[in-house]
Every structure is written in C-alpha cells, then in structure tokens.
Image (tube, helix red, strand yellow):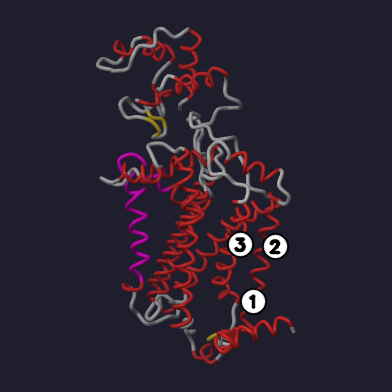
Amino acid sequence: MILSRIGSWFDDRLHIGGTVKGLMHKPIKGGAKYIFSLGFLNLFLFVNQAVTGLLLMLYYAPTPDHAYDAVKYIQNEVSFGYMVRGLHYWGATFMVVSVMLHAVRVYVFGAYKKPREIMWLSGVFLLLVVFGFAFTGYLLPWDQKAYWATVVGTNVAGTAPVAGSYMVRILRGGADVSALTLTRFFSVHTMLLPWTLAAIAGLHLTVLQLVDHTPPWGTAKALKADPFYPNQVFRDATIMLFAFAAMAFLATAAPPALEALADPTDHTYNPRPEWYFYFLFQILHYTEGPFEIVGTMVFPTVFVAALLALPFIDRNPILAPGKRPVAMVGLGAVVAGFMLLTIIAAVTPVGEKPAGPESPGVVHGRQLYAKLGCATCHSIKAVGGKVGPPLDHVGNRRGRDWLTGHFKDPQKYSPGSVMPKFDYLPAGDMDALSDYMQSLK
C-alpha cells in the first residue's frame, strides 16, 4: 500500500508510469532466455563493486605509509570487513568473466551488425574500462604483488615508440612507482573510471531500447515472444542471486591474499598478474627481446582496432551462426588462443625465487644498494637510472670475486666506467653487496 502511494505520488508529477510499464512489459523477441541475463549481471556486478568499494573507502588511505595497514585492518579487524573486501575482489573477477561472455554472446548472435553498431562500440569501450578497473585496482593494497605487478604493467607503456617515457611518467607520476602513483591510481580507480563506465553503460542501454534486441534467426523462434516482466526478470534475478551467493562463498572460503608490505628494493620478487591478464603476460614472454614491442603495443592495438572495426567490416546481414562459418572460426581461434595462453602462463613458473628466507647478507646488501644510491645509475626490473648497465641478471654473469673487485676499483674492471670506488667499505658490507648482486638471477 505504501509503495503504491509513493509510486502514485511520483507518477502524478513525472508521468513516468506509462514508460515504466512499457519497459516492464516489452516483448522479448525469441522468448526469455538465461543467456540474455548477462547484460543485467554486468549491471548488478557494477553496483556490487560501487557499494563494496565505497565501504572500503571508509577505512582506506591511499598513501604508502597507511594503505597496507588499512587493508590489513579491514581484512582482520573491521566487522565483516573480510566479506566486503572478498565481495569486491571476487566481484572484479566475476565482472571480467561476465563482460567477456557477454561480448561472445553478442558476437555469436550477430548483434554488432546494422543498426546496432553504436551498441557494439560502446560495449567494446565498456570491456576496456573493466580491464582498466582491474589494472588500477592492483596497486591499492600496496603489498609485494601490487607493487611489482604495477612496475611491470607500467613498464609496458614505456615500450611505446617516441612517447613511451612520457607515458610511463604520466602513469606513475614520476620515474618510479611511488606515493604519487598510488594516489594517481586510486583517483582513477575510484573517480574517473566509475563515472566513465556509468556514462558508457547509460549510452549502451539507451541504444538498446532504441534499436531493440537482435531478432532471432529461424521462423519458429521469430514467432515467439515473452514479456520482460515476469519472464526475463525472473531469469535475471536468478542469475543475480546465484552470482552473489558464489561471491559470498568465495569471499569466505578463498579470501583475497595480502602479501608482505611492498618493498621497492626487493628486486628478487617475481610478480604474477591476476589470471585474466595471463594471456598478455604469456604473449610478452614470447616476444621479449627485440620483438618486445609486438607483444606490448602492436598486438593489443591491432586486436582492439579489429573489435572496433568489426561492424564496418562484416556487413553481411545474416545472423545465424551456422551460416557465418568464417566469423565462427575466427571467434573459436580467439577463444582457444586466450584459453591456451592462460593455461600455459598458469602452469609455467615465473622464474627462480630464493629457496626459503633470504640470507642476512642479501637483505643487508639490498639495504646498502638503496643507501648508497646505486639506483641513480643502475636499474633492476626497469626501476632506476640508465647511466650504468641494468643489473637484472648480474648474478648469472659475474662471480663474487669479480663483483668485489669491481666495487673496490670499477675503472680497473670496466675501463671508462664513471662509477666511484667503494674501497672504503668494510669487508662485511662488501660481502653483503656481493651477496645481493649474486641473488639477482
């Protein structure tokens, strides 16, 4: 009764009753189907991310001094904090999967063709924004994985011709991943991307109402039509409840991990991205070296450009998948490639890691490396200066005696070197520096 009166009050002033009724009873061509619920699922997951993200922001502080402790406090101390963080973490995974499945469904149904080009283009941008959410949210816990995965991810932008160095500085707010990077990623993640996604989603839904769903193929299917309410609404609600129950279960049974506090000097850490970035991670592995730009710039650019150009390339009005063999083979190749690269990256070790805890010598040597300002001239994992050679794998190339001698008299071992002598260091410090260099393999 109360809800009815409230509805009548709004309708008397805004006259929206007829519009709402028309939308609720709009016929679904081909009948209501669970597969049509993917679009609603995306909307529900976005709302879940917005609500849980807002709750997390009540306790989070985007500074290196407080971010890690804030996340740890949310996870361990705040009432139901573990559930909120878990719902946000798994909600991101579910959203990536749901958006990709929705894109596949639209492709199979031929819903990118005239007159639905704008709906497809907005959907591609929504997909990119979702991956942008995933990438910018990486850094916020400020643990080891967050820090070093962001270092690697932003280094990808540095491979761009001409503008690469500028792009890295724009992303990081400087040469290295720092407090400015964390603040910048937090701002983009919580303010820029949500409003961008909301605007594009609004356009997407508006165009959907104007051009309607893709008509079904086949005479029998074309004759069938179900009203949106209650037929499709029931299916949408069922999918929503199932997704929420699954996220709540995972939030409890498999809560998101929080590794050690980020250590910018720990160059022995081997970062691994979330599974939905594995395919790109593996492509970068195959193209490292002189062909690095193919994996970092050429392939992603060509793939996104192909998605955007698809409605203008495929102008065949036929919608039935069975009568579009080239399109279906292309989709199969993309899906198979994505799954294969993901599996290979999942089962392939990232690299050698120290067996057990680091030795005191390595820890002390890493501290000396930072204290002496060695990163001013040398880089490790692309972090640092470029005056001297990178030290990523120096432990494979140089022995302890050579390293110790080089520290004492760089010009003797590397003629023309501008590196100062460190012969004044105590023997213990010299050994610790050598231990740290030996660990870089």
**Quarter of the image where one finds residue 126:** bottom left
Q: Earlier in the sequence, mark 3 or mark 1?
A: 3
Quadrant location of the N terminus?
bottom right
Indicate which disc residue 389 carries: none
What count of labels does the image hold?
A: 3
Residue sitting at x 55%, y 28%: 354
Quarter location, residue 332: bottom left
Marks 2, 3: nearer the viewer? 3
In this view of the protein, which residue sits in the foreground, 73 or 137? Answer: 73
- Circle 3 is placed at which residue position? 48
Kind of residue indicated by mark 2: Ala
289 inside magenta stretch: yes
Disc 1 marks a residue whose amino acid type is: Arg
Q: Which segment did they paint magenta?
A: 283-310
Mark 2 lies on residue: 245
Is 232 part of what is drawn in magenta?
no
User: What residue do we see at 48% from left, 51% from top?
Assistant: 187
Q: Mark 2, residues whose alpha carbon is within 10 Å: few (<14), some, or many (≥20)?
A: few
Residue at coordinates 65% horizontally, 73% vertically from top-left?
Answer: 237
Would you call the spot at circle 1 few (<14 residues within 10 Å), some (14-19), or many (20 or more)?
many
Q: Quadrant of the C terminus?
A: top left
